[in-house]
Image (cartoon, rainbow, N blue to C red):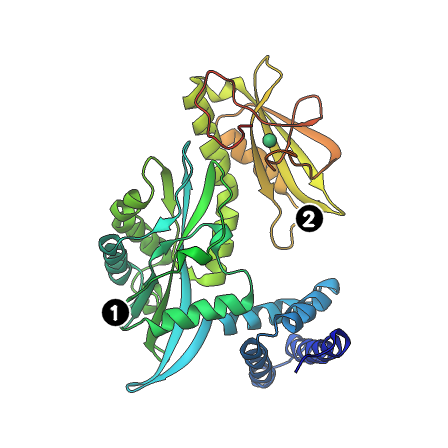
Amino acid sequence: MKTSPSSRRGRASREADRLVELAEGLAQSGSRAEDRFWETRLDTEIDALLTAGDEGSLNAALDRLADRESRAYEELADAIEGRVEHVMVRTSDGMRDVLLFASPVLAWSRMPVPTRVVGEKTLEALTKAMREHVFSDKADLALADYFFSPDQLPESFGETAELRASLTNHITLGRMPVDTGSLNETAQFLADQRYILGVVSVPEGEPMFKWQEGLITRDEVQAAWRQAAHDSLSTLLPACGFDPMLPRAYYVACRDADRAARPFSITASVAFLTTTLGIAPKMLTAIIAGCYNRQLEEYRIGFQVEHEDEVIHGIVWPLLGAEDEMSDVVEEIEATLSEAGITHIEMQRQRMPMEYCEDCGAPLYPNTDGELVHAELPDNTESTGQHLH
Ligand SMILES: [Zn+2]
């Protein structure tokens, strides 16, 4: 039956009301026992909406709570992400916990950073390294056979839950073929994230990750994974500098990667500029400016060579989570630039617009005169190929 837009809105609103009510109940709960009461009801509602593909109600409830800056927002977001990435599955051996996870890799290259199908041998080697160094002895794994860019990750809660479900169906096989035709195009940056995605399955209540067994810390797991994955990742990322991050549950791993990608792209850019131009970092000037829509959205950082006028490279440093103009973000940017050896740092205090190049869509970056301009490498140097027109 075709429903009219108004009846649809009415229904979405009632369902969003219910989520808001339950999330507020949970936020104000005074005991673990009461928490469980609200959580169980919230989980049931969320599952029903995910099954019905009703993304609108989930987002409407989140939007409503976000406006109020309440703890209930955090509770609802946690509950939705939890239901999307985790499921209990009944098998012939009893109930099992199944969790969608992501293994992010930060990478940079003067060539485009690849996204690609992961060959059988490499996927096997990655699975083996994860079994030995990341997941508990009781874990079963299935990995997607694709190396994803951020643009290619599922966009909605429903799509993410679907990916978790398809991977779950491939646990016995250990690998899931990805339909590459359905993936988005990837925007090219000098430095970016790439992801290996998979599900891990353990008997109900057993540890999933090595650190849950209490014998080894997260840091030790990350160090071991970094070493064990190095050769396979070199195959996936030829001619790239890269840094594998700790594999974790999907949403938290993506947030870790977004956060770590910001300083990583500064370090990568300075390495790129100094080697490409054959200059020391202290010959570069970095110009930081805050870019606004209605509110501060991101900082943009332009790079100029000492005594020259052109902006030769730029970086976007997006705000994440609850960050706003009151956060110590500029201090963090300046500290990262200093660590990379940049001694000339200018802050443009005026509010700048979120402007992009009309031809290629590249962000414009601040120069020392306080204008937003196109970043162009000098003609006689190798170009990254992203700003040619
Ligand atoms: Zn352009």
Location of the C terminus by quadrant is: top right
Q: Is residue 130 above or below residue 332?
A: below
SS for callout 1? loop
Q: Residue 111 appears at what percent x and percent y?
A: 40, 33
Q: Answer yes or no: is residue 207 visible.
A: no
Image quadrant in which you'd find residue 44: bottom right
Q: Residue at x 23, y 55 (%)?
A: 125
Residue 337 in the figure: left or right of residue 94: right
Report the front residue among 117 and 280.
117
Determine crowd level at label 1: few under 14, some 14-19, many 20+ residues with C-alpha closer than 10 A. some
Q: Is residue 307 above or below residue 66?
A: above
Count up the numbered dots.
2
Residue pointed to by mark 1: 137
Location of the N terminus by quadrant is: bottom right
Residue pointed to by mark 2: 324
Q: Residue at x 35, y 59 (%)?
A: 217
- Residue contact between numbered discs 2 and 1, judged by CB atoms under 8 Å: no
Amino acid marked by disc 1: Asp
Q: Residue 193 appears at what percent x and percent y?
A: 45, 47
Report the front residue among 120 and 222.
120
The quadrant of the rendered image in which ligand 1 is seen is top right
Report the front residue among 378 and 215.
378
Amino acid marked by disc 2: Asp
Q: Answer yes or no: is residue 139 visible.
A: yes
Residue 184 in the figure: left or right of residue 30: left
Determine crowd level at label 2: few under 14, some 14-19, many 20+ residues with C-alpha closer than 10 A. some
Q: Residue at x 62, y 47 (%)?
A: 319
Report the front residue among 323 and 31.
323
Q: Residue at x 62, y 27 (%)?
A: 374
* Mark earlier in primary sequence (2, 1): 1
Q: From this viewpoint, which residue is outermost toward the front?
A: 1
Q: Is residue 27 above or below residue 226?
A: below
